[in-house]
Image: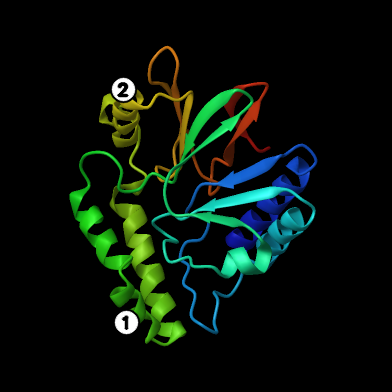
Amino acid sequence: MAESHKREKQIVKWLTEIEKDAKAIYLVGDIFDFWFEYNKVVPKGFVRLLGKIANLTDTGTLVHIFVGNHDLWMRDYLETEIGVKIHYGNIIIQEENKKILIGHGDGLGDGDYLYKILKKIFISKICQWIFSRFHPNFAFTLAHTWSQSSRKSGDEAKFSVKEKEILFCYCQELQKVNPVDYYVFGHRHLPLELMIDKKATYINLGEWISQKTYGVLEKGILKLETHK
């Protein structure tokens, strides 16, 4: 809990530092270790972060949140309460004369077929209805246990070669039919910058548990930065 609060304060500090320059902020999923919205209950915690994001949207900064595999049960609470835009899949934007595809990254490309089956079950209305019948104390304990096992099972596998990166291979295939300048994903929790071809770059934004990395688009160039 102490580490979580420390990390939350650092993220809020980063958001405060960038707000004067940011036209829009894209948070590409797994913002929360687990998230579920009962009709009358929302997860405990995250007060500083949610308050800061609300302040950003209130003052005119666009904030986009992509649903990740750890927080895939987002509904409309964050949109109605703090004014963010929730995305459930990839989007393509045009900024500074660059075409950029942004998404979380889970379930894309070849492989990981067991997860793809489980995801279809998890996002079904029947599964969500059943889960909503559980008392929040039990439900969140169960969910956090599952989340921790998921992190240990390979979500954060180390980089070996780009040909073994599922998202990199996915970007290569997309580039053949709908070319863009940048592909930006999360999910791997591993900061990466890999050239797709002479035109396009795949960027994975990494994570804030230990690396504290993020991407910045400035003067038409998208690059990774580290918060000190």
Q: Residues within 10 Å of mark 1 (few under 14, many from 20)?
A: few
Toward which corner of the image does residue 54 lie, by quadrant?
Answer: bottom right
Task: Determine which of the numbered discs, if any, sits on residue 130 in the image.
Answer: 1
Q: Residue at x 38, y 56 (%)?
A: 69
Query: Vertical placement of 100 versus 181: above or below?
Result: below
Quadrant in which the C terminus is drawn: top right
Read off the residue under disc 2.
Answer: 176
Q: Is residue 26 left or right of residue 17?
A: left
Q: Gap between marks 2 and 1, in whole Å?
A: 42 Å
Query: Vertical placement of 32 versus 13: above or below?
Result: below
- Spot occupied by residue 1 in the image (x, y as percentages of width and height): 57, 67
- Spot occupied by residue 33 in the image (x, y as percentages of width and height): 47, 61
Q: Residues within 10 Å of mark 2 (few under 14, many from 20)?
A: few
Residue 1 visible in the shown view? no
Query: Vertical placement of 31 versus 146: above or below?
Result: above
Q: Earlier in the sequence, mark 2 or mark 1?
A: 1
Amino acid type for the residue under numbered disc 2: Lys
Q: Secondary structure at mark 1?
A: helix
Foreground residue, 62 or 136?
62
Query: Vertical placement of 133 versus 117: above or below?
Result: below
Foreground residue, 81 or 146?
81
Q: Is residue 59 left or right of residue 107?
A: right
Q: Secondary structure at mark 2?
A: helix
Q: In the orientation shown, which residue stands out farthest toward the top?
A: 198
Amino acid type for the residue under numbered disc 1: Ile
